[in-house]
Amino acid sequence: MKKNLIVYASRTGNTEKVAIELAKNFERYGWINELKKIPDDYDAKNPDFSFDNYDFVCVGSPVISELPLDQIRTLTYGKPPLKRLDPGPKCGIVFCSYGGIHVGPMEAAPALKLLEVELMHQLYNVIGSLAVPGSMGDFNNPDVYYNDLIDRPNEKDWKDVAAFVDKIMDKLKDYPYYNV
């Protein structure tokens, strides 16, 4: 059985819901999942786990002003060598939850790209990124990009997560490490 780490930060609970949904979908393929929530006060420079102990890694954060939370960036950045990074045989994905009140999904793009770069510092091939809209509490205004945030993420979003994991499993066929 392959072992998957789902490491994430969450403030409103949206990113945590996505992490749990990812775990459920990896379990459909027989994977063992370890969910690791990283609180704001976590000592991200001295983690209590090693990325090296996992076959696959999912890294997630809420989007705050187009960026992931600092503790996730610090955790994934680690201490890369001052040389070109060559990813190893293992793969991972990045994910986020976002409000998208101004320009919708584009608000998540910078956070996802930054998370991809940071996960590469852990020598993982990043083979996918996922952004899921989430509620911002009672904020519901028809003048914003997403005027239906109160009920997000919802069942349609969970179907999108399932389809995303299906695509990731298909991509793993290109990586001998996984013998899929």
Image (tube, rainbow, N blue to C red):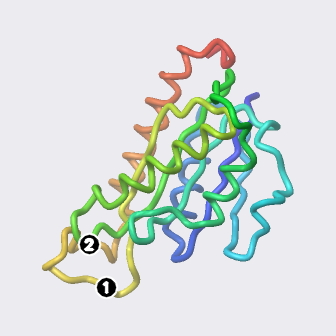
Secondary structure of residue under mark 1: loop
Residue found farthest to the front: 82
Q: Is residue 33 left or right of residue 163?
A: right
Describe residue 143's horizontal placement relative to residue 104 as left or right: left
Q: Where does residue 140 sit, x and y in percent of width and height?
A: 26, 83
Residue 157, how many percent across, how many down? 37, 54
Name the amino acid type tagged 2. Ile
Circle 1 residue? 139
Q: Which residue does the image show at 54% across and 52% down from the upper left? A: 21
On the image, the x and y values in percent for residue 10 come to 57, 69
* Pointers 2 and 1 in contact (C-beta within 8 Å): yes
Q: Position of residue 158 (x, y in %)?
A: 42, 52
Q: Residues within 10 Å of mark 2 (few under 14, many from 20)?
A: many
Depicted 175 relative to depicted 11: above or below: above
**Pointer 1 local density, CA inside 10 Å: few below 14, some 14–19, many at least 20:** few
Query: Is residue 32 shown above or below 100?
Result: above
Residue that appears at 39% across and 64% down: 66
Most distant residue in the left direction:
143
Q: Amino acid at mark 1?
A: Phe
Q: Quadrant of residue 149?
A: bottom left
Q: In the image, what residue occupies the spot 67% across and 75% down?
A: 40
101 over 128 or under it: above or below: below
* Sooner in the amino-acid sequence: mark 2 or mark 1: 2
Judge by depth and name the residue closer to the eye, 150 or 58. 58
In terms of secondary structure, where does tag 2 sit? Answer: loop
Asked which quadrant contains residue 32, the reply is top right
The residue at which mark 2 appears reads as 101
